[in-house]
Structures are given as C-alpha cells and as structure tokens.
Amino acid sequence: MDATGPLPFDKPDAVGLSTRGLARLTEVLRSAIDRGLIPGVVALVARRGKIAHLQALGLRDPAGAAPMQEDAIFRIYSMTKPLVSVGVMMLVEEGRLMLSDPLPKFLPAFADPKVAEERDGRIELVAAARPITIQDLLRHTSGLTYEFTGISPVQKMYADAKVSRPGQTSAEQVATLASLPLMHQPGTRWEYSRSTDVLGRIIEVISGRTLGEFLHQRIIAPLGMVDTAFHAPADKHHRLAEPFAKDPETGLAVNLIRTREAPTFESGGGGLVSTVLDYARFCQMMLSGGTFDGVRLLGRKTVELMTSDHLGPVTGSPDLLLPGYGFGLGFAVRRHAGMAPIPGSVGDFYWGGLAGTTFWIDPKEQLFAIAMIQGPGQREYFRMLYRTLVCAAVAE
C-alpha cells in the first residue's frame, strides 16, 4: 500500500503559529541569501498534522538564474541515517535481529576487533572487551569513527585505507572497516561514525536486497516519497539544488557527492537525495508513532524506544552532540529543557546532513520543521538559527 495523499495545509494561526514570526523567519533567510551566504533554501514548518509554512527562496543553482523551487532535490547526506535506522528497527520488529545481537552474527569479519589505545605516546592494539552490538551501531557507541571528524591515529588509518573511496561496494567497505582498529572500546563513548554504513550492509545481508531496494520497498514507496533515492534520474536533473562553487566564507572549493548516476556504493550513512516535501512524510510518520496516511511502518513502542536516550552517562564530541542532548537509535534526543543553545522540548529529536539539510521533531508541541540548503560550511550556524526562529513563532 502506498501513501499518496499530500500533507494538508493550514494557516499558521490555525495551528498555533505566529504569522509575524514566520514572516520574520523568511526575512532572515532572504537576507542571508542577499548577502551571499547561501544560494537558496526550502523551508517547511508543520504542526498538528498540517503544513503551516512552506517556502522556497533564492537560487536552485547559483551557476544559473533558475529560482529555488519547493520540489528541489537536495543531497541530504546524514539525514539518510534515520531512514536506515527505521529499516533496522523494522527487521527487529520482525524478529530477524535483536538490538543485543553481536555484529559478528551477521558480519563475521568483525569477530575479533582490536582497539587502538595510546600508551606512552605509542599506539597499542588490545582486544575489544566485548563485541559490537546492533544497539551500539544505532547509537554510535561501536568504536568506529569517521576519518574527517578528527586527526587521531585511527582516523588517519581510515584516511590511508581510503574507507570512502568511490566505486567500492558496501561489502568491500565493511571488509576495510573490519580490518582497522576501533577508536574506543564498544559501548564506552559516543563517536559519530560509519556505523550506519555498517547497518546498511546488515540490512542487505538479512533481506537479500540492495539497501536501495530495501529502503524503496519498505519505507520510501509506502510513504509516497517519490523523489527520495540514492541518485536523481535524468528526468529530474533540472531539479537538483547545487552549492556555490566556492565557500563564501573560506573561498575553498565545495565538492559534494555525485547525484546524477546510480552509485556502486549505497551509503546508509549519507547517500540519499530527497525533497522537503518527501522528508516531511517521514517526519510525520515518526511524529505519529510509526504511521502515516494509513500506512504503519513501526509500532508506537518501537518509535518511543528509538527516540529515547540510549547514552546515559556515556559522553561524546560536544561539537556534534549539543549540550543537553543524548542519542537514541538514529536521532539525537533532548534530555534537558535547558543547557542547549537552542530552544526546544524535552524529548524532541533531530539530525542533519553535511551539506546543510536539517530537521527536528517535537512531540510535545506536535511540530516538526525541515530546512534544506546546499552549503556545508554554513550548516551549523543555519541549523541553530532556523531552530531558534521557528520556535520563536510558536504562539500557543
């Protein structure tokens, strides 16, 4: 069954949002575009099951004059991770794996992982105290890492091994990862990582399908996400949103993933393209406890589990995990009303993508918001700015 009905629209004041506040949001985003900070943006705010604000501003491709459109297709990078996490939890609900399952049960190459420990200025490889679990992968406590988030010895090993090399298959990347030491003992530290790429491979092993096929058949098509895939076909190339050729602040070249042809490697951690309206359907499904337009993907208790904190006292990188937030199964989850530099509610959950896309879902306010830009150097500033301005428009 496909969910083909659109999300309904309503006036802001009908869902407790300030028209003036949303107009101010538009003014701020337009000013950023006029000052050359971002090429364009598509922004959406929904509350109580209705879209109250949808606007496209600026240029879709700064190399030309085509205006941004509401159906522009964006590289969403790590906003791929929540979809893959939902896919894993669908398999959990079917009894095909458990959160406590050890990773080697599905990927034997991880049967004997080593951990790189620094002692007296030297790296020593020691045995992992316990196996990586599925839960570790979902909450990023696996000990895996990303090569571009730091300069530790393990991250340098990732770079030397070309973990992200183009043209490889998912199976080949997993084999490379398994041959490298872990950065931390499993379960001891939150380290944003290629864990979700590994989850994508687990989905392939269990389902017998490619990750793209699985996501399309089980999530994307049932939710009616018609423009979400691992590439944009030729008849949609004219809708692709593009970044500036050079970062407006640093002057460095901006290089994003290729999206015009099908990739050999379908990255569970960051390979999808999508639109604001497509991703809104996914957000509404999560906000509604696993169901959208008569289609149920997950049980309500599973969604509650995914959007609860799974870190407890485990700490992580403060530049990626905001103060006041823990991490669930695929999402950062707010634990405190204060501490974070952005407004929100205890229990809200969010994530974003490297090129500048972002979303968050606030069950208490029955609200979700999405903003999509293609400006990697500006992503952190605009995520917090957008959240602040949207929350300022909550009137009741």
Image (cartoon, rainbow, N blue to C red):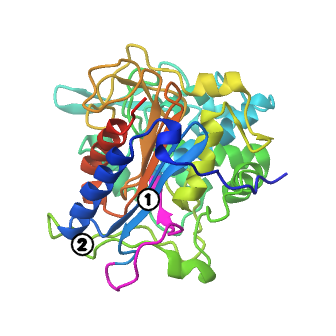
**Image coords of residue 227 (percent x, y):** 62, 65
Q: Nearer the viewer, residue 138 or 176?
A: 138
Residue at the spot 51% in from the left edge and 82% down from the top edge: 238
Q: Main secondary structure of the magenta part?
A: loop
Q: Residue 156 location, x and y as percent?
A: 29, 49
Contact, mark 2 vs mark 1 (Cβ under 8 Å): no
Side (left or right) of 264 relative to 346: right
One can see residue 198 in this view: no
As shown in the figure, which amino acid type bears the numbered disc 2?
Ala
Mark 1: amino acid: Ser
Which residue appears at 50% of the width and 69% of the height?
Answer: 72
The residue nearer to you, when weighing 111 against 379, is 379
Q: Which mark is residue 164?
A: 1
SS at mark 1? loop
Is residue 208 at all visible to an observer of this figure?
yes
Residue span colored magenta? 62-77
Q: Position of residue 383 (x, y in %)?
A: 32, 46
Look at the image and say whether residue 68 sits in the magenta stretch.
yes
What numbered label is drawn on residue 219?
A: none
Residue drawn where x is 52% and y is 57% of the image: 276
